[in-house]
Amino acid sequence: MIRRSLGQTSRRDVWWVWPVLVFLGLSTFIVYSTWAAFQGRDYHFGPYLSPFYSPELWGDSPHSWFGPKPGWWPAWAPFSPALLILWAPGGFRLTCYYYRGAYYKAFWADPPSCAVGEPRKSYWGESSLPLILQNVHRYFFYLAAIFLVLLAHDVWKAMWFTDPGSGKAHFGIGVGTIVLAVNVCLLGSYSLGCHSLRHLIGGSRDQLSKAPLCAKAYQCVGCFNRRHMMWAWFSLFSVGFADLYVRLCSKGIWHDWRIF
Amino acid sequence: MVQQQATFSIWRGDSAGGKTVDYTAEVSEGMVVLDAVHQIQATQANDLACRWNCKAGKCGSCSAEINGMPRLMCMTRLNDLDLTQPVTVEPMRAFPPVRDLVTDVSWNFRVKKKIKKFKPRKPDNPDGSWHMLQGDIDRVQEFRKCIECFLCQDVCHVLREHQMYEEFIGPRYFVYTAALEMHPLDTEDRLPELKQSQGAGLCNITKCCTKVCPENIHITDNAIIPLKERIVDRYYDPLKKLFRMFRPKSEG
Amino acid sequence: MPEYAAHEYDVLIVGAGGAGLRAAIEASAAGVSVGLVCKSLLGKAHTVMAEGGIAAAMGNVDDRDNWRVHFADTMRGGQYVNNWRMAELHAREAPDRVRELEAWGAVFDRTNDGRILQRNFGGHRYPRLAHVGDRTGLELIRTLQDHGIHQGMDVHMECTIVSLLKEGDRVVGAFAYEREHGRFKLFRAKAVVLATGGIGRAYKITSNSWEGTGDGHSLAYHAGAELIDMEFVQFHPTGMVWPPSVRGILVTEGVRGEGGVLRNKEGRRFMFDDIPENYRSQTADNEEEGWRYTQGDKNARRPPELLTRDHVARSIMREVKAGRGSPHGGVFLDISWIKERLKNGAEHIKKKLPSMYHQFKQLADIDITAEPMEVGPTTHYVMGGVRVESDTQMSNVPGLFAAGECAAGINGANRLGGNSLSDLLVFGKRAGEYAAKYAKENRLGEVSKAQIDEVARQALEPFERGGSGQGAFQVQHDLQEMMQDLVGIVRREDEMLQALDGLAKLWERARQVGAPGNRDYNPGWHTALDLTHLLTVSEAITRSALERKESRGGHFRDDFPNKDDAYATFNVVSQRGPDGEMQIRREPLKPIPAELKAIIKEMA
């Protein structure tokens, strides 16, 4: 059979729409998040901390764990608290089973879409370098789980507003609190539907009934996993939006409403 | 009954080559593509070759590519297609053509034979039966819905575009292996060959197999990825390796 | 001098459905060489269409069940013209055959305590059908296939037998063509097992695939074997009736087993109107009791929808003829009503009847969880077939065995749902076992060159006439129309005599049939060669139906609407006469032993 060239197909539908949307969606996020990560400023506002910058290990905001930029940081390298940590959630998404399939199609045309011709003849799949490294996914999940806890803690902190007069912290909820909370929920729905987690928590067993707790957990993870793609996109959008929200407030472009 | 006519561009040819030929068929309510092919066969082209059996989506014989997408002809209703343009009906691309819509799918049967067969543990009861709970077999039953239409094999680009028939067994046989590996009674180990000669690592999870599956089996999410994870457990995860050194008999 | 590839086996098995595969597994296990021939790809046989389950008295759900009840149910369903010995073996051995499947990897639905779940079905007193949702046939064939391919048998896929070959009285092989390139194959074998399935393609409205052309019946008949009970054709009461292109496709009895009810257009559950005398004591007399039965209440009696298939099919015909049918000439089968009784009704239906749900959704645009289905009778199964010795499954022709639908005896005048899958397993195994034994005891026979030349010449004849001959599809179509109209569910002497005339004309046309094109995968040619088989079984059905001047089971005579005890004493046998004409005679039933008689009486 004669090999088809790139984009050659008998398909009648507009097969290229979905990969183009994925390409645009992911590209937009990558461009924005890279830009935001290199800013190194405007990432906190009041009790809010942008999720791109959490945890802030070293930095200038009150959220910083270990104080300002360390002295040993090379002078020639750009510094931003986001650069220290963003590799972890980034790696989680990069090695995620859903995103892999999506970006192989949208960015690498391997294949461009189902039953559509490809540009390259050679193919290695994920069985040799570099893509064999995708198997590290579960370790990124462990890290992502830690981040999830930290981000949840950020939401807690985002409920305590310091009164500028008295310096006392009051419980309150602002729009930003809700933005951060929704973001954590969406990130949770995405992370807890991870294929690796589903395997580790019970999928590796052939007789789940012998471990009722695992069976329950497996069901729960399975529930999120069924809509993994949806959660992946929602949470991607929400995490970017949360950063944008904090940034706009911090820049004074947007006014954060206190609900109570 | 609303009668209308539609044009079908059907690939006619054999291993030496071929081309699509246009036929006109009478379309009536509820018709599927296979009905149109049969009508053409009975009235215009007695020697038009196609496979079919049950005509109800249960046997998986009438696989073809309709308007470029791998589908069962018996489950593709004409009123879901745009009949103002000719409907193209082509044989599966991933397999060598035999004649018209019939392809040589024998490779699939040879692959299956290479996969280690089911090996149950000793029966639990004196009458030779086992204790098995529904909750433990739900997963396996999903895989056993497979009707072996080979549409997933056809759409998978590793076979379709890259012809890696020697080093890759295709989605159908990942589903098959997953059903055996996750079977509560099975004691066989199929992971080494799954990683080495059967090419689980070649799948790049583009999910086209899941998309075309007429039985709606979640091939990628429920079969292939869990198998990949089991391979990670065994071969790539240093923590698991360490864990196994201290507890050599981890649960299977 | 025809060209052909020659193969030699101890046992040649024709057909790779449930019976053929089971026979092949058994013969291989006995240590003989086995060749398995099938018309389609392996695993596509009509067995995949079986939905409801495998009847086996394991008593997992109701411990009152045992082989004796199953035996009595089968005999009652068959109206006592069954081969009692086969019914006995079947009932006794079915549970082991089912458990064996589990050992080969089958994954049946489970009871809460982890055993094989069993469901209710028409004519079975207790829940007895081991099942996997509504795709039990697929599970069965896949299990046998996956086990079988590791047993060392040779599989010849897409290969059709055109004739059996004989040496004297004995069958010693078969002549075949493979579809791919139309090349001939000669099989020499010490024993041949026919497991070719049914004859549904003789009718217009049928649940059978193209394969159900009665090959085994006809091959055996032309080799001198006796066919019995050919008048008993089962019309399944519930086939799809709309849209036209899916007419005949089966709607599993499992729908009724799960609580589905039949209504006419007035909304009346007409099955309550006519409950046969011999089932009255076992049948619910009100809707409430029938519902409780389907929900597992052991004290309830079954709803009349679960009466035997022959009776339900006729009741539906009666409603349609009386003008109380559905818009497209059927009646309504409603499962959606159970939502009134079950909280998660819709989900329950999807879980229990997934393929029915999809079948209607995709083919008819109907959501069965929300609206009723339209159903009507469809040709489903033939009780008649090759007459075999009950323990060994050998026919009256030495070396020729038959099992499954193409063999006869176990089902009598009407088969109970679920008994065919168990029949396949029980008698498939026996046929394989005894064919292997026969093969070990006998030498390979000789096939004369003249015989091969003649068979090959006949097979190629359609090409000589090419496109100028009669069209094979047209002849087949006319036969199906005629059989549907004249020898269908309701039969009359004058119509059947008319059918005999029609058959004579169709035989004549079949002799003039032509095939355009070449031998490569040519459906026109394949259909031309199937015509002999279709015409042979159609003639046997018609002649046997004329002989039985009463109504019994699947055979209903408008001119003799009642059962006649005088006809309960014999089977109708069709056999090829010395001049090639079909001869019909009555063969008295063997007297039933006292202890089995006692069981029937006890269970009545």
Image: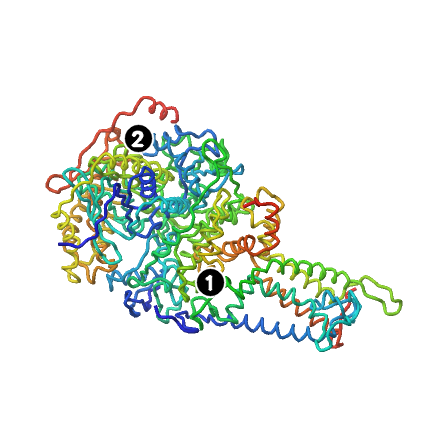
**Tag shown at residue C476:** none
Specify the subunit that label 1 lies on. B
| Quarter of the figure with residue A138 | bottom right
**Tag shown at residue B208:** 1
Residue type pointed to by label 2:
Tyr
| Quarter of the figure with residue C173 | top left
Residue type pointed to by label 1:
Cys
Q: Which residue is mark 2?
A: C80
- Give the answer, above or below, for where B88 lies relative to C85: below
Q: Residue C365 at what x, y percent from top left?
A: 43, 57
Specify the subunit that label 2 lies on. C
- Give the answer, above or below, for where C322 lies relative to B172: above
Q: Nearer the viewer, residue C85 or C600?
A: C85
Res. B113 visible in picture: yes
Determine the residue located farthest toward the front in the rendered image: B245
**In 3D space, how far apart are the residues under numbered discs 1 and 2 (Cα atoms)?**
55 Å
| Quarter of the figure with residue C393 | top left
Which quarter shows the C terminus of chain C? top left
Determine the residue located farthest toward the right in the rendered image: A166
Q: Is residue C485 left or right of residue C166?
A: right
Residue located at (28% from left, 33% from top)? C392
Residue located at (35% from left, 60% from top)? B31
